Image (tube, rainbow, N blue to C red):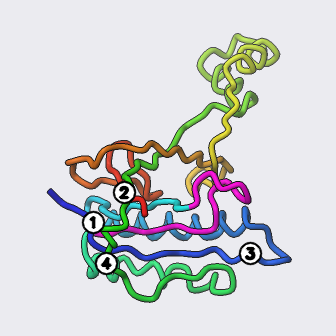
Amino acid sequence: MTEFSHYQEVTLIEQPEISLGVIWQKFYMQLHLALADYRTRNGICSIGVSFPEYQSERFPLGTKLRIFGTSKEALEEFNLMGWISQLGDYVHITKFPREIPWKGVTSYAIFSRKEVKTNPDRLARRRIKRNPSIPFEEALYHAQKIVKKCHLPYVNMRSLTSKRDFKLFIEKNEVEKLDVQLDFSSYGLSKGSAVPIF
């Protein structure tokens, strides 16, 4: 079984001229690019993330993110610091990977992406694409019934392929430690791989 051994902690620094939400957006886009590059080079992404202040009262995702790797060398190869160097005024990252303090681990959690249908116009356009004879008003009426409200924390993102903005909703589920292969998306999230909480 592959297991995490090291982590790095990222702290987002609030600034008077830029909101924490915008800092999360800029930082997470760079993290996403770094993870996509890492996955391309290695075939699988065994780098996962956690949000230690998830559901914080001040800001839903808090101001911290932990990045986990299977070794000190894996995190050094990942080299997030190189990807976020232009965000130096807004983001601080621990310079060197640290060993996970296993005695301080309180639980395990899976942080996953929750896809939610939130845009009725887009749903209506998709319905019309499948069936062009439907009037837009009718398609919109049906789409508004489908649209869901979501109260999970999220990061505003922009798709590099479609150039559309979307919300990356992040769900946390506490679990027993899972004996599974570590496999994370290019967002550092997973449907079945857990990360330690401490």
Measure the alpha-carbon separation of dots 4 and 1.
9 Å
The kind of residue tagged 1 is Phe
Q: Nearer the viewer, mark 4 or mark 1?
A: 4
Residue drawn where x is 32% and y is 80% of the image: 77
Q: Residue at horizontal 52%, vertical 44%?
A: 171
Quarter of the image that includes the N terminus: bottom left
| Number of the label disc, if any, that sits on residue 14 | 3
Residue occupied by mark 4? 99
Residue 18 visible, this angle: yes
Gap in angstroms between the C-alphas marked 3 and 1: 30 Å
Residue 121 vs residue 79, the one in the foreground: 79
Determine whether the residue tagged by mark 3 lies in a helix, strand or loop. Answer: loop
Q: Which image quadrant is residue 155 in?
A: bottom right
Residue 73 horizontal/vertical position (percent):
26, 81
Residue type pointed to by label 4: Glu
Which of the two labelled residues, at mark 4 and mark 1, occupies the earlier sequence position?
1
Residue 35 in the image: state x and y as whole percent.
Answer: 42, 65
Image height of 7 relative to 190, above or below: below
Which mark is drawn over residue 4? 1
Cα distance between the residues tagged 2 and 3? 26 Å
Dot 4: what SS? strand
Q: Position of residue 176 (x, y in %)?
A: 30, 44
Neighbourhood count class around disc 3 (C-alpha, 10 Å): few under 14, some 14–19, many 20 upward: some
CA–CA distance in space, label 3 to label 4: 27 Å
Residue 195, disc: 2
* Magenta segment boundaries in residue numbering: 53-69
